[in-house]
Amino acid sequence: MALALQTFSTLKDANAALQSAGTRYLGGGTLVVRAANEGDVSVTGLVRSTEPSLSTIDVSDGKARIGASVTMAAVARHAELGFLAGAARAVGGPAVRNMATVGGNLFAPTPYGDFAVALLALDATVTTEDGETPIDAFLAHRDVSRAIVTSVGFSVPQDGFRFLKVSRVKPKGVSVLSIAALVERAADGTIASARIALGCMADRPMRAKAAEMALVGANLTKEGIAPALAVATESTSPATDPIASAWYRNEVLPVHLGRLLLS
Ligand SMILES: Cc1cc2nc3c(=O)[nH]c(=O)nc-3n(C[C@H](O)[C@H](O)[C@H](O)COP(=O)(O)OP(=O)(O)OC[C@H]3O[C@@H](n4cnc5c(N)ncnc54)[C@H](O)[C@@H]3O)c2cc1C
């Protein structure tokens, strides 16, 4: 079946066109075009917008805003987003990264969504024509979202941000799991706050809330983080797929989380 692609210069017109049944927004197309090519007949039309702000990155006054059409390759090479380069480079190989967008990654189903995991740890907000939504809420309701994501925004961490992707095929294999953590320390060195996001441990990126709570007040040592690792798999529901079983993902999560926290 032929796919109609409509291009609009304004977001308003693109959002209006997106309301037609079967119409999907076209980011880099690495998932939605593949789905259509593979016979997903629920996709009958594609909409894109050339609004310039979709493709810009702005970092100023400790805040970052990344347009939804910005690619992983552009994030990886941005001088002021060095702390996110690892997460951007975790997405596919070079050809995929040149097309894969930040907006599309928010919708990528498990085992994809590695960059969204990083954004979840950063407590990002997701902007659509309806305003800004905390990323936790956005991810929870993404299946019913019919609005174009225009950008993501977050505070740039001074330090304490860590990201890890575990895969079997290096360097561009699909995730066994991915972890992003933002750990802030108090003056005495103990952990003041922690946000830990997990990829492949549910059908979409999730927070490891029990582990986050167990880390507060703890020392960032093997002994100090042990209680957090003991509850790391609380509320997880990983998939079993050709990459790994749910059992395996739960078994190795505490090991990798421990290594990441102590890195
Ligand atoms: C070979 C291969 C390897 C891959 N490896 C990885 C990997 O290692 N890690 C990983 O995370 N992903 C991986 N992916 C998946 C994918 O490339 C990325 O998740 C990518 O970021 C998706 O973005 P996209 O722009 O291509 O999305 P698209 O295919 O354009 O869109 C995906 C979905 O998101 C919606 N969408 C896109 N942008 C917007 C927007 N601005 N507003 C509203 N809706 C939007 C689309 O309508 C569609 O439903 C891989 C894909 C391939 C083909």
Image (cartoon, rainbow, N blue to C red):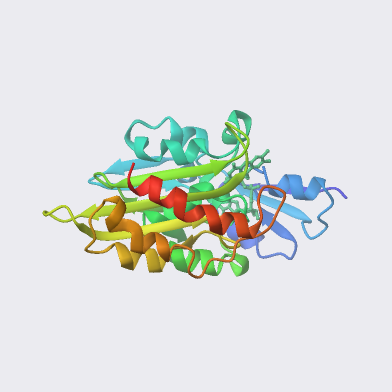
Residue 148 visible in this rendered orientation of the protein: no
**Observer-nearest of 146 and 181:** 181
Q: From the viewer's perspective, is 30 left or right of 262? A: right
Q: Is residue 11 above or below residue 133?
A: above
Tell me what residue is drawn at x 59 percent, y 46 percent: 175
Quarter containing the C terminus: top left
Coordinates of residue 90 in the picture (x, y in percent)? 52, 38
Please count the marks in the image.
0
What's the residue at 57%, 32% (across, down)? 98
The residue positioned 22% from the left and 46% from the top of the image is 61
In-image side of 211 versus 142 (left or right): left
Residue 210 in picture, x, y percent from top left: 39, 69
Q: Is residue 44 visible?
A: yes
Q: Position of residue 169 (x, y in %)?
A: 63, 35
Give the quarter of the image for residue 223. bottom left
Residue pictured at 67% horizontal, 42% vertical: 30
In this view, the residue farthest toward the front is: 223
Outermost residue toward the right? 1
Position of residue 204 relative to residue 93, above or below, is below
Instruction: State the residue in front, 12 or 121.
Output: 121
Q: Nearer the viewer, residue 46 or 72?
A: 72
Figure quadrant of residue 212: bottom left
Q: Position of residue 67 (x, y in %)?
A: 46, 46
- Location of residue 187 by image quarter: bottom left
